[in-house]
Amino acid sequence: MTKILKKQILNPTVTKMVVEAPLIAKKAEPGQFIIFRAKEDSERVPLTIADYDRNAGTVTIIFQIVGQATTELNSLNEGEYIHDFVGPLGTPSKVEGLKKVAVIGGGVGSAIAYPVAKKLNELGAEVHSIVGFRNKDLVILEDEFKTVSDKLLIMTDDGSYGAKGLVTNALKELIEQGNTYDEVIAIGPLIMMKFVCQLTKEYGIKTTVSMNPIMIDGTGMCGGCRLTVGGETKFACVDGPDFDGHLVDFDEAMKRGAIYRDTETKKREEACNLLKKGEGN
Amino acid sequence: MEFTRNMDPKKCPMPCQEPDVRNKNFYEVALGYTEEMAINEARRCLNCKNKPCVSKCPVGIDIPAFIAKVAEGDFEAAYNVLTRYTSLPAVCGRVCPQEVQCESVCVRGIKGESVGIGRLERFVADWHRNNGKKIAAKVETNGKKVAVIGSGPAGLTAAGDLAKKGYAVTVFEALHLAGGVLVYGIPEFRLPKDIVKAEIENLKALGVEINTNMVIGKILTIDELMEMGYEAVFIGSGAGLPRFMGIPGESLNGVYSANEFLTRINLMKAYKDDSKTPVRHGKKVAVVGGGNVAMDAARCAKRLGAEEVYIVYRRSMDELPARKEEVEHAEEEGIVFKTLVNPIEVFGDENGNVKGLRCIKMELGEPDESGRRRPVEVQGSEFDLEVDCMIMSIGTSPNPLIRSTTPGLETNKRGCIITKDESGLTSRTAVYAGGDAVTGAATVILAMGAGKNAATAIDEYLKNK
């Protein structure tokens, strides 16, 4: 059981929680993840660690409410307990030795990109952060990114905040302006990471992506999180979640990510119908 | 006590759910002996002098002694004999491959069937759970702390034996539930989870502390455990990453590793309507492999409503590594065995879902290093199977988490932890290992044997330290 110390609504679909997890906080590094089960009968779901405080013994998670598991997690409040919380899992991001990096976050993926940007900043690298959202209301972590970035570009799909356009537009512009990056680190929806990688391949810039496939145990037992990377089968939980973006088969990952979408939609509809029935009575 | 020896050449049959009924539910298949059946079966044992059965038991149970107590109708006394040797009798009675161990050398088996040792062991453990004294006596602690990594059969056995010797044992389990393969791998219909839970409660009553959600190698390393005051460590972290064949189409949706398929069903209860964890209910399912895990996966798929379930195995029926009883049960339940067949490609539809499997026929050639005849492809014999789900059950390779975070812990080229001898001592002082982490995928009872030996060795080491 893991106690929720602080809960903050970042936007209508994204919540931040600071939890008491001293042993995990002691070991966590950017890029690593935890697996949670909100309640005793909940599904196991991975979440990348958004921040940690070794002294306070806390771990921060930021999640988008997308399905049943995250809805259940979001139903818990400060002072309550998450039933299971295990980590830190996966291999930490390799950021040592980088001098100038473009860190790209898309949507809630920005929450995962943030600790990487923070670590790079601590290590003295020049950090250019590009974060993209659908619109102004969904923008998160702006202040946090500002404090750890030498340059911060916020992009929105509809132009309601920052610049209008996609993160790839901003990245291309920075590169065209003559910025030379040791590496691009992109974390966000698969489709965003795919297009970032297409762009950086043209320029020959090494690109790391953080994959977030469906997982069960997260410790290298079930094999559910497998991906094809450079023609080989890799397991995101122990080999990743960071991979060389130019080698990842994104199309396959997108199909695999959708395997239970029909079941989930059906479940949600059933739940809605029940609610409707309830209203009728 | 005087009684007449039962000279029936056959074992007393095990009452089972009817195949057509049980292949639609997850309740236990074998229902267990009644007291009368158990006594009758026990009276088939000749109590022979040589006791060949004992030498073939990985944990060395005094089999004739416990059976003699059953023959007398003193079931609690029989249980007390068993627990001197095994911490998990209800489990062993159900999942041990008795036909290649104790029962394979039973004198009664020379002219007829061996004594049903496994069935009797199960009966005694179940009888005790339902009727016996509940409380295990807590042993006075000697104050020495031992850490056990993993709560599968190896870890639980080591923990139980060490607790009985007075050690303060802490078990670290990576998942949210203790039991390892007994809870995530072996299905309910073969090993009800309430039984595993009861065996674990017994260990807790002995004073064993179980910490779930602790992935050793990540949250804490073995060196840190030592710094925390654990004077010895036993690694029973189990098998690891599932193997795939490396054929085209293995990443299609609907291709599972047996580990994933079974974990969804057993640990996460995906077979229940109200489970929050989904699993694909295939209509036509191919399970690749011939071991116990393959049988479990096939029988689960059937119970989820599959019309056709195939076991696709590259050797013949004679080489199937699964327990004989599991193969028989699977056949009775309507599982179709496609032996001397190997998959070469998986086909998908436009959405990335499995829709078929291309296979090739095999024939047995010269024996390979395992002594079994090597299967070779029959040229031009390709054929297609229509399936919408496929489960790969072709073994595992050891988990890297502990070896990669424990300096000085030697592993072989396959990644299995190297132990010096039967004691399970690794290349690190005070660090012992056993079970699948050492041997690669094997059986529950071999893991228990390793846990038992390591517990003895750890006790010797700490007493003389």
Image: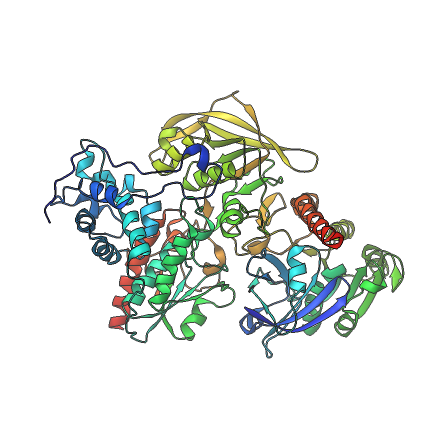
B440 or A196: which is nearer to us?
Answer: B440
Drawn side of residue B355 relative to residue B52, left or right: right
Residue A162, visible in the rendered structure = yes
Residue, far front: A281
- Residue placed at 70% from the left, 43% from the top? A251
Query: Residue B182: where, in percent of width, then height?
Result: 42, 51
Instruction: Identify the image's colour scheme: rainbow, by chain, secondary structure or one colour.
Output: rainbow
Q: Which image quarter is the C terminus of chain B in?
A: bottom left
B190 or A102: which is nearer to us?
Answer: B190
- Looking at the image, residue B379 lies above or below residue A31: above
Residue, far top: B380
Query: Residue B349: where, in percent of width, then height?
Result: 67, 33
- Looking at the image, residue B381 lies above or below residue B187: above
Drawn side of residue B106 relative to residue B394, left or right: left
Residue, far bottom: A55
- Residue placed at 35% from the left, 60% from the top? B426
Residue B450, visible in the rendered structure = no
Count of number-bearing discs: 0
- Looking at the image, residue B100 lies above or below residue B269: above
B9 or B419: which is nearer to us?
Answer: B9
Q: Residue B251: which quarter of the image?
A: top right
Query: Residue A241: where, in percent of width, then height?
Result: 62, 56
